Image: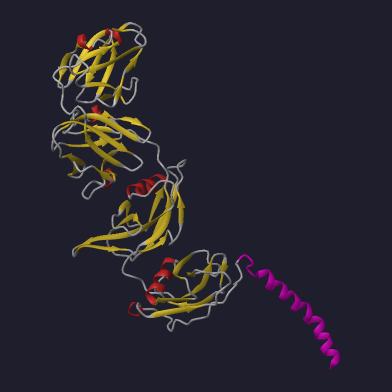
Amino acid sequence: MKNIFKVLMVFLLPLLLVTSCRTDADRDWTSPEGSFTLHDTALGATVLYPSMESNPYILTWDAPAGATSYSVVVSSTEDFAAKAVVGTSDKTTLRTTIGELNMAMLQAGINPYSPQTVYLRVESGSAVSNTISFTVTPYPVAVPVITKPTAGQTIVLDAANPLATAATVTWTDYTYGVNVSYNVEIAKKGSTDFVSTGTVTDAKELVWTNFALNNAVLSAGLPVGVSSEVDVRVTASTTSVGGVITKTSDIVTFKVTPFQPAFVDFYLVGGGTAVGWNGTGAQKLYRTEEISEIYTYLESNGEFRFLGQQDWSPINYSLNADGINDSYKYFNTWSANLEPAGSENMKFTGNSGLYKITIDQNSRSITVTPSSVPTLPAQVYLVGSIQGWDAGNAIAMTQTGDGVFEHIIAIPDGSEFKFLGQQDWSGVEWGNIHTGGNSGYLGPNGDNNNIQFSGGNNMYKVTVNVKLGTYTLTPQ
């Protein structure tokens, strides 16, 4: 008998060793080992129902050395490749509810109405607890559930690749039986001023390009180059014989770092301006980096907006206000003499006259302030090196339109000149906006310097349009 036992051991021992080696080889050594203990807490039910929403669910764990904050996460896989946060705590206990646990499971991609194994663990920095698991059937909620981005996710937008995908918003929802439109909106954390980032129909995802998300984030008033918290929500809208039904998801908060977009040009157009409703003749503003500005005429209660080109499409800029077309919304703040008008324009509520319009692209603000020369002149005179800087004998220009004057003259190299509203230095004047040069834009008293131009002693028509805020030098 002893000999038989010895023979069996000879055959069985290698098999045991092979099995042991295979078990070690099959183990997932990439998952971190639990460094502190999460105590197993039973749910008390394997099938969850909405009536359990407020029922408490309490988790406790042992404190690892040096830990001060904890996140309890849930996943449908043991490696926690996709996870959602159930809750956070600065103690070794999390008191939550079945409803919050159910929501986190849905956010982690765990499907309702089917029993699945769910994994829970506690994370504190790089330390993780052991994993507990149980089989449970979650219940669906009555609103869309955002699955991406996840709470706390960080997105850094890439200015070098504006059309590349920055993130994709995904969500789960019911099958309605009718067409459903989803509107994805963001806002500064805690704000109720949501900005639409796009809509889709009968789909459950929306791609955010770097440009699109950056534009929406800046419209929401967040600073460039700073990681800020953003709330995202999805609203489902369906229309049937019973009317329109809207259901809005719970908010998910993530972080995003926007970039400063390339500075753009603005073109003024509108019935309340010197241009009128002439898209191809829209007046370009003078721009230095992020600041665009012009001294021009505005009509009381006149409407206007800005274009991104001398055409009606594709880009229009207006106030970021209720009732304005979403694609036109741009200016986050504006001076008190402006207000939204209709679905596209802004209205100037001040008195008719000459004003300075200033746009700051960094803050997306627009202000309208009175010019130091508030009214159109009856006459304009040309003075400068081309006539000896003799204001008393300044050259009277010929009026050709409302606030428009011109004169033909030979202009030598190195010439400098200005425009006066009278034949002396005591009254109004206009020159090149801000500093000496030849920008083509007028600046009034206190904000101008000499127009500088080398004409080779050739004949030029000098045209000044005080109403529009420009001047031109045209060879003859």
- Is 339 inside the magenta-drawn segment? no
Note whether 443 is above or below 140 in the view shown: above
Q: Position of residue 303 (x, y in %)?
A: 17, 37
Towards the viewer: 424 or 74: 424
Residue depicted at 15% across the width and 27% down the height = 375
Q: Is residue 314 visible?
A: no
Q: Is residue 266 visible?
A: yes
Residue 48 horizontal side relative to residue 418, left or right: right
Note whether 124 is above or below 229 in the view shown: below
Please state the extent of the stretch shown in magenta in the rendering.
Answer: 1-30
Q: Quadrant of the N terminus?
A: bottom right
Q: Position of residue 80 (x, y in %)?
A: 53, 67
Note whether 120 is above or below 361 in the view shown: below
Q: Residue lying furthest right in this view?
A: 3
Towards the viewer: 119 or 204: 119
Q: Position of residue 83 (x, y in %)?
A: 48, 66
- Is 16 inside the magenta-drawn segment? yes
Residue depicted at 36% across the width and 41% down the height = 362
Q: Quadrant of the C terminus?
A: top left
Label count reads 0
Q: Residue lying furthest front in this view?
A: 426
Residue 87 horizontal side relative to residue 378, left or right: right
Predominant SS along the magenta part: helix
